[in-house]
Image (cartoon, helix red, strand yellow):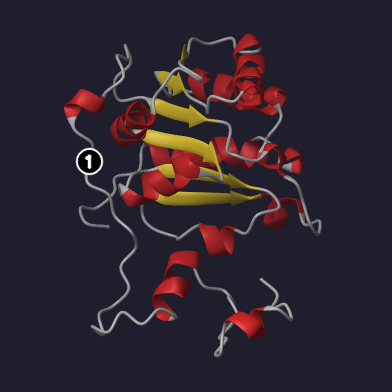
Amino acid sequence: MPIQWYHRRAFSDILAPDLGQLYIAEYYWQHTKVGDGSKFEPPALQRPPKEWEFPLVSKNYLHVNPTSGWKSKNWTPEKWAHTINKLAESGIGPMVMTSGTQDWQKEHCEKIYQRLKCPIENVSGLTTLKNYLSIVSNARLVLTVDGSASHIAAAYQHKCVTLFGHTSATHFHRNTEYSRAVDALKIVGEPSCRLVSLPEEPVIAAVSELWNHEVPPGS
């Protein structure tokens, strides 16, 4: 964030190191005085307890979470539906779809649902935060836009494919054995590229590859 004139009236020392190419969590780690000299480790979550589970029918599922807190991160319902249908045709499934509880988030998922030719367990807008954490944790793979589902999956060290548009895959995605970023900017090559420009094929390929990829323990 830019330093404003009034900041100097509140703070005697201002340090604003450039983010550069760092993953955001590592950036804060490097520039926070933790005092123990330990090596950066990405944030980690314990698996949620069984009582947080949502009563899903599906097991070992692909978790599709098409929304985040920002409408600007949306992919189109048509592209979501085409991708989900193609993945189902290739034998990937069962599938579970979630979203936040805002009306626009539920409407976005409903538009996707109406265009599907394959079954999906649609619980969009019906879950609590505890349910949501459990659904992410128990999925075989998470497919989502840049947002909470991606970050939570990373904290569980769980397989995840994240779609990026105008937000930075460099800063908000950490490359691992269990994660893939599909970056519209790199694929489409337009400055300030929005996610709506991303074609379906790279997403289908990334999910198909990671779905069957064996992740070494502790990766």
| Residue 89, percent from left and from top | 52, 18
The local secondary structure at tag 1 comes to loop
Q: Is residue 135 visible?
A: yes
Q: Nearer the viewer, residue 70 or 164?
A: 70
Identify the image quadrant of the C terminus: bottom left
Left or right, 111 with reference to 158: right
Q: Nearer the viewer, residue 126 or 138?
A: 126
| Residue 52, percent from left and from top | 25, 27
Quadrant in the rendering for residue 20: bottom right
Q: Is residue 17 visible?
A: no
According to the image, label 1 marks what residue? 47
**Label 1 Cα neighbours within 10 Å, binned few <14 / some 14-19 / many ≥20:** few
Quadrant in the rendering for residue 56: top left
| Residue 90, percent from left and from top | 49, 23
Outermost residue, front direction?
A: 9
Relative vertical location of residue 158 with respect to residue 7 in this rendering, above or below:
above
Quadrant in the rendering for residue 55: top left
Q: Nearer the viewer, residue 71 or 200?
A: 71
Outermost residue, right direction?
A: 190
Q: Amino acid at mark 1?
A: Arg
* Residue at image coords 30%, 47%: 156
Relative vertical location of residue 54 with respect to residue 76 in this rendering, above or below:
above
* Residue at image coords 48%, 43%: 148
* Residue at image coords 47%, 74%: 27
| Residue 184, percent from left and from top | 69, 50
